[in-house]
Image (cartoon, rainbow, N blue to C red):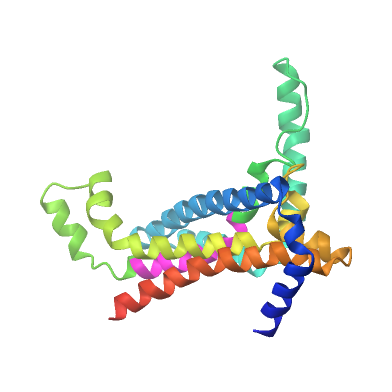
Amino acid sequence: VIPLLQLLVWFWQRGRFDLDERYAGLILHSLYLGGMAALITVAVAMLLAFARRQAPTRGVRVGVALGNIGYALPGSVLAVAIMLAFSFLDRELVIPLSGALGGAGKPLLLGSLAALLVAYLIRFMAVAFGPLETSLARIRPSLPEASRSLGVGGIGLFLRVYLPLLLPGTLSAALLVFVDVLKEMPATLLMRPFGWDTLSVRVFEMTSEGEWARAALPALTLILVGLLPVILLIRRSARRIG
């Protein structure tokens, strides 16, 4: 409570004067990155969860373990590794191919939104995989088997059987990834495209310059935006228990 009160005091003293169009852009950038990262990460995590359930071979288990290792890495270390990999791809593939096709021959991957979203995907795969795997484990094998016996298979089986049962876990996974992306600073700071500042980057910039009062506004916004999904998760869990 005390840190929150201090942030409110700083906001009233100085932070409220920073409410302008640029600040609206910070919020939109943060929400866009969080939403896109949640969508992509949940989709890939669902594929991994299904692969592990349908074909639990050693290769699949190793692939799932490698896919979930990113959460154990510091964001800055992961960002540097991805930047080196994308720089290599730009130099050896993108630039020569672009030049051969009559393009400008400039790097396209490094410093792009795609590179940043890949970093989020690797970083937060484990966050999305856990709830999805738990939800998938609760589905008895007899349910899809019965559906197949009735002629429902393929995409119809997923939409009619799996998706409704996986929806609570999917929403939980998406909300968790969304909140983590909003708070992620090292990877965003190192890999964001030019002009794509976010709330977490703004907090870092202000605190690094000693402008603690001006950092209160983006910090409070992060708390508010991050608190709403947590409240939704708590209410959903309470309803499920009740």
Instruction: From the viewer's perspective, tell me whether residue 35 is left or right of residue 144.
Output: right
In this rendering, the answer to whether 121 lies above or below 212 is above
Q: Is residue 125 magenta?
A: yes
Q: Is residue 162 visible?
A: yes
Q: Point out the residue furthest to the left here.
A: 150
Q: Nearer the viewer, residue 149 or 79?
A: 79
Q: Point out the residue furthest to the right here.
A: 209
Quadrant position of residue 10: bottom right
Residue 74 spot, x, y in % from top left: 72, 66
Instruction: From the viewer's perspective, tell me whether residue 231 is left or right of residue 8.
Output: left
Q: Is residue 15 magenta?
A: no
Count the marks.
Answer: 0
Q: Residue at x 72, y 31 (%)?
A: 93
Residue 101 spot, x, y in % from top left: 69, 16
Q: Point out the residue furthest to the bottom here.
A: 2
Q: Residue at x 82, y 59 (%)?
A: 205
Residue 232 spot, x, y in % from top left: 43, 68
Q: Is residue 68 visible?
A: no
Dominant SS type (magenta): helix
Q: Residue at x 23, y 65 (%)?
A: 141
Residue 185 spot, x, y in % from top left: 72, 61
Q: Nearer the viewer, residue 196 or 190?
A: 196
Magenta range: 121-135
Question: In what quadrant of the picture does the N terminus appear?
Answer: bottom right
Quadrant position of residue 167: bottom left
Instruction: From the viewer's perspective, tell me whether residue 181 is left or right of residue 127.
Output: right
Question: In what quadrant of the picture does the C terminus appear?
Answer: bottom left
